[in-house]
Image (spheres, rainbow, N blue to C red):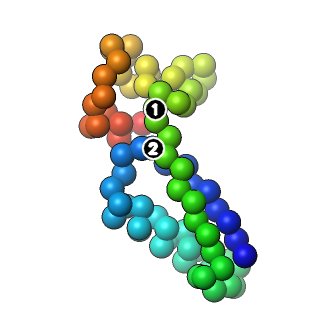
Amino acid sequence: MAYVTVRINKGNSIERKRKLVKAVTDALVSTLDTKSEYITVHIEEIEREDLGIGGVLQYDKNNNKREDRDDRDDRRNW
């Protein structure tokens, strides 16, 4: 049995998540020589405001310190 957690940025479509789960499962089945029903993939979504790299929130880095706002298009740029 294999359990995998994949952390991705929030805002991906359900179709992208389906493709991700399929690709991860296929890779583990091939690598571990096991059956797909023995693979569990957990997707954890992360907000840019909850991730800091080098002491800087990714939200601040990509928004050039603009005021807080909910802009779905900006979320893909990190």
Which residue is disc 1 drawn over? 48
Q: Position of residue 28 (x, y in %)?
A: 63, 74
Relative to 57, is 72 above or below?
below
Q: Please, what secondary structure does the residue beneath circle 2 have?
A: strand
Q: Tell me if residue 30 can be seen.
A: no
- The residue lying at 31 percent from left, 33 percent from top is 74
Q: Tell me if residue 33 can be seen.
A: yes
Which residue is disc 2 drawn over? 9
Kindly report the distance in space between the C-alpha atoms of the residues bearing marks 1 and 2: 7 Å
Report the front residue among 22 and 62.
22
Q: Position of residue 47 (x, y in %)?
A: 46, 36
Q: Residues within 10 Å of mark 2 (few under 14, many from 20)?
A: some
Which of marks 2 and 1 precedes in the sequence? 2
Q: Position of residue 21 (x, y in %)?
A: 49, 67
Q: Along the horizontal axis of the image, is 49 left or right of 1?
A: left
Report the front residue among 38 and 52.
38
Callout 2, which amino acid?
Answer: Asn
Q: Are marks 1 and 2 in contact (CB under 8 Å)?
A: yes
Relative to 47, is 11 above or below?
below
Relative to 65, is 78 above or below?
below
- The residue lying at 30 percent from left, 28 percent from top is 70
Count of numbered tags: 2
Q: Position of residue 18 (x, y in %)?
A: 41, 67
Which of the numbered marks, if any, corresponds to residue 73?
none
- The residue lying at 63 percent from left, 74 percent from top is 39
Callout 1, which amino acid?
Answer: Arg
Q: Residues within 10 Å of mark 1 (few under 14, many from 20)?
A: many
Quadrant holding the N terminus: bottom right
- The residue lying at 68 percent from left, 66 percent from top is 3
Q: Examine the image and state in which quarter residue 6 appears.
A: bottom right
Q: Please, what secondary structure does the residue beneath circle 1 have?
A: helix
Quadrant holding the C terminus: top left
